[in-house]
């Protein structure tokens, strides 16, 4: 399995946002890797770490999530790898709930998101986003 962190989705992933998707909420699992030092696209000088720059973005995203009917449901620092192997661990795991894929696209396309996105770009070395759907109490049941 090849794992590639990215900061922005590719064209195929972007087209996926426009697809109808599952009915009901989706949960985005975010595996985040931060830059040691924030690097703003406009070249501004900063003493912020990548994690600190991303925190500015994350605080604003939490408010946007609420406005769009979603919520940040979980966030924690990665401590260690318990099973398996990867070249490098992510720094943080976060899970955000959106009422639908369409609601996520609406939020991601908002003017507010475009404004705060500069802090995300400055702080992230890369990430994986995994769209999941809740199973309402089922665990590993076949469909």
Image (cartoon, rainbow, N blue to C red):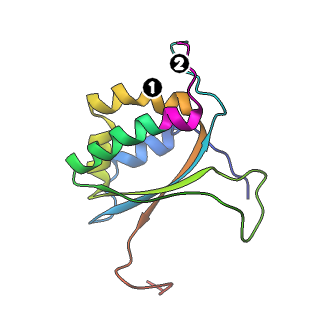
Answer whether residue 85 is magenta in the image: no
Counting from the top left corner in percent of width and height, residue 88 is at 75, 50
SS for dot 2: loop
In which quadrant of the rendered view does residue 27 lie? bottom left
Crowding at mark 2 (Cα within 10 Å: few <14, some 14-19, many 20+)? few
Farthest front residue in view: 47
Task: Name the mark on residue 72.
Answer: none
SS for dot 1: helix
Quick one: label 1 or label 2, which is nearer the N terminus? Answer: 2
At x 64%, y 34%, the residue is: 35
The reply to whether dot 1 and dot 2 touch (C-beta < 8 Å) is yes
Q: Name the side, left or right, on which 115 lies relative to 12.
A: left
Counting from the top left corner in percent of width and height, residue 79 is at 66, 60
Counting from the top left corner in percent of width and height, residue 71 is at 31, 56
At x 69%, y 51%, the residue is: 3
Counting from the top left corner in percent of width and height, residue 70 is at 27, 55
What residue would you read off at disc 2?
41
What residue would you read off at disc 1?
118
Answer whether residue 53 is magenta in the image: yes
In what quadrant of the picture does the C terminus appear?
Answer: bottom left
At x 44%, y 41%, the residue is: 14
State the residue in front, 143 or 67.
67
Q: Which region shows up in magenta?
A: 44-54
Q: Is residue 108 above or below residue 42?
A: below
At x 32%, y 53%, the residue is: 101
Q: CA distance from mark 1 to mark 2?
A: 7 Å
């Amino acid at each position: 399995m090849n794992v590639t962190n990215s900061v922005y989705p590719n064209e195929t992933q972007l087209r996926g946002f426009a697809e109808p998707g599952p009915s009901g909420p989706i949960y985005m699992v975010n595996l985040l890797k931060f830059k040691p030092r924030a690097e703003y696209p406009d070249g501004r000088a900063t003493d912020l770490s990548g994690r600190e720059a991303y925190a500015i973005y994350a605080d604003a995203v939490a408010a946007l999530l609420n406005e769009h009917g979603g919520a940040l449901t979980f966030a924690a620092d990665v401590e260690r790898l318990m099973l398996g192997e990867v070249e490098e661990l992510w720094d943080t795991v976060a899970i955000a709930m959106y009422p639908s894929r369409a609601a996520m696209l609406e939020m991601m396309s908002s003017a507010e998101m475009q404004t705060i996105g500069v802090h995300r770009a400055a702080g992230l070395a890369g990430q994986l986003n995994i769209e999941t759907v809740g199973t309402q109490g089922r665990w590993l049941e076949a469909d």
